[in-house]
């Protein structure tokens, strides 16, 4: 599968950035893809070696928005966490800080 049909984008949060420093990178993916598709897409797009792939379906939650506080449903999505071979990085998650 093509990487454009698998990966929607990176998930940039405080937790995902802490995980990225340990070699685990988090992506938002389409809900119909499986772990092998995700592995191939990440390896092809970023030229790295994936050791492990974990997926989580994040359920949609209700929230209230606007001045009239209308209740809306946030869309459910699939999250993929890939673990890379030691010493490899994805530049997309690089913060530029040296520790």
Image (spheres, grey):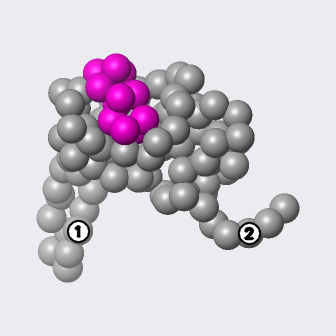
* Along the viewing direction, whichever of 67 and 95 lies nearer the viewer: 95
Expressed as whole percent of the image width and height from the top left, the position of residue 85 reads: 63, 31
Q: Which mark is residue 2?
A: none
Expressed as whole percent of the image width and height from the top left, the position of residue 26 reads: 48, 43
Image quarter where the N terminus lies is: top left
Vertical arrangement, residue 50 with respect to residue 4, above or below: above
Which mark is nearer the camera, 2 or 1? Answer: 2
Q: Residue at x 61, y 48 (%)?
A: 89
> Is residue 87 rendered to the left or right of residue 72?
right
Residue denoted by label 2:
97
Magenta portion: prevailing SS class: helix
> Is residue 72 rendered to the left or right of residue 93?
left
Q: CA separation, marks 2 and 1?
A: 36 Å
Image quarter where the C terminus lies is: bottom right
Residue 15 in view, yes or no: no
Q: Residue at x 22, y 46 (%)?
A: 4
The magenta stretch is 34-44
* Along the viewing direction, whichever of 10 and 92 lies nearer the viewer: 92
Callout 2 crowding tier (Cα within 10 Å): few <14, some 14–19, many ≥20: few
Lower position in the chain sequence, tag 2 or tag 1: 1
Q: Residue at x 37, y 38 (%)?
A: 44
């Amino acid at each position: 599968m093509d990487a454009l049909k698998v990966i929607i984008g990176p998930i940039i949060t405080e937790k995902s950035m802490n995980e990225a420093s340990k070699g685990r990178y988090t992506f938002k993916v389409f809900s119909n893809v499986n772990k092998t598709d995700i592995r191939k897409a990440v390896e092809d797009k970023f030229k790295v070696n994936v050791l492990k792939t974990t997926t989580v379906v994040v359920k949609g939650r209700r929230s209230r928005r606007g001045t009239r506080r209308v209740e809306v449903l946030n869309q459910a999505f699939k999250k993929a966490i890939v673990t890379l071979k030691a010493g490899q990085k994805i530049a997309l998650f690089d913060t530029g800080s040296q520790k």
